[in-house]
Image (tube, rainbow, N blue to C red):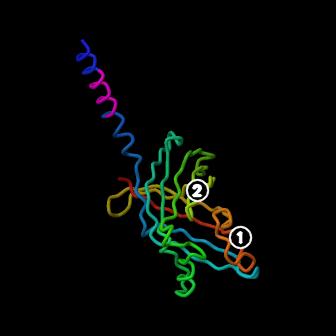
């Protein structure tokens, strides 16, 4: 009797998994690093803004328009990929004064919740990890669009603008000469898997 009950439960679990898997799979996307950007700006001497970017962001996106609470985002960049179009400055940014890439090579964001605010705007709560410190972050993301590409794939895109304080993560070098607040624009394009 126990074996029969176990087999019945096994069959039910298998059927549930097989019927749920296609729904989940159709909402899965992989971030396209060639068509995604992380751009930042920081004040320099209080008189101008210096811009930079992180190349090659990667990650996974689950986007469920019908049930946004089922959506999620995991994204990361290698700190070595910081790029301000100035080799000397980039080398300094990779040092222990700033991103300390030898000790903390990856910057990551992992969502903990997604809420739809209106037809095109979502609030994404998550954990941002930089320099080994994880802080809660909330960003508003605009859904730019979704559709087929010329190669037969299906893509979706989002953009978020938000601000962090570098001192919250222990990046205190050159406070005053450089601003504490860092403006960030994250634009992702993701390909359905």
Query: Which residue does the image show at 56% across and 72% down from the upper left?
Result: 99
- Judging depth in this view, the residue of 173 and 10 nearest the camera is 173
Say which element carries label 1.
strand
Instruction: Please identify the residue farthest to the top as the structure is shown.
Output: 1
Provide the major secondary structure of the magenta segment: helix
Question: Which residue position is annotated with label 1?
Answer: 180
Does the segment drawn in magenta span residue 16?
Answer: yes
Q: In the image, which residues are magenta?
A: 9-17
Question: Which residue position is annotated with label 2?
Answer: 134
Left or right: residue 119 compared with residue 189: right
Does the segment drawn in magenta span residue 57?
Answer: no
Say which element carries label 2.
strand
Please count the marks in the image.
Answer: 2
Left or right: residue 188 compared with residue 43: left
Left or right: residue 56 compared with residue 22: right
Query: Which residue does the image show at 56% across and 65% down from the upper left?
Result: 131
Q: Which mark is residue 119?
A: none
Crowd band around label 1 with a 10 angstrom C-alpha radius: few (<14), some (14–19), many (20+)? some
Horizontal and vertical percent for residue 19? 33, 33
Is the residue 5 above or below the residue 178 in the image?
above
Left or right: residue 99 compared with residue 173: left
Location of residue 175 by image quarter: bottom right
- Judging depth in this view, the residue of 154 and 71 nearest the camera is 71
């Amino acid at each position: 009797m126990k074996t029969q009950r176990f087999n019945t439960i096994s069959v039910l679990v298998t059927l549930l998994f097989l019927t749920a898997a296609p729904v989940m799979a159709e909402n899965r996307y992989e971030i396209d690093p060639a068509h995604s950007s992380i751009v930042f700006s920081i004040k320099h001497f209080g008189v101008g803004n210096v811009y930079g970017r992180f190349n090659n962001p990667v990650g996974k996106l689950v986007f469920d328009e019908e049930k946004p609470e089922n959506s999620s985002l995991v994204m990361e960049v290698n700190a070595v990929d910081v790029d301000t179009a100035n080799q000397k400055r980039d080398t300094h940014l990779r040092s222990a004064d700033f991103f300390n890439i030898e000790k903390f090579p990856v910057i990551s964001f992992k969502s903990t919740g997604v809420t739809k605010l209106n037809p095109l705007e979502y609030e994404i709560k998550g954990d941002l990890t930089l320099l080994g410190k994880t802080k809660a972050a909330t960003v508003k993301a605009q859904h730019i669009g979704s559709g087929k590409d010329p190669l037969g794939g299906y893509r979706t895109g989002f953009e978020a603008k938000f601000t962090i304080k570098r001192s919250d993560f222990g990046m205190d070098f050159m406070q005053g000469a450089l601003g504490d607040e860092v403006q960030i624009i994250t634009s992702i394009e993701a390909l359905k898997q």
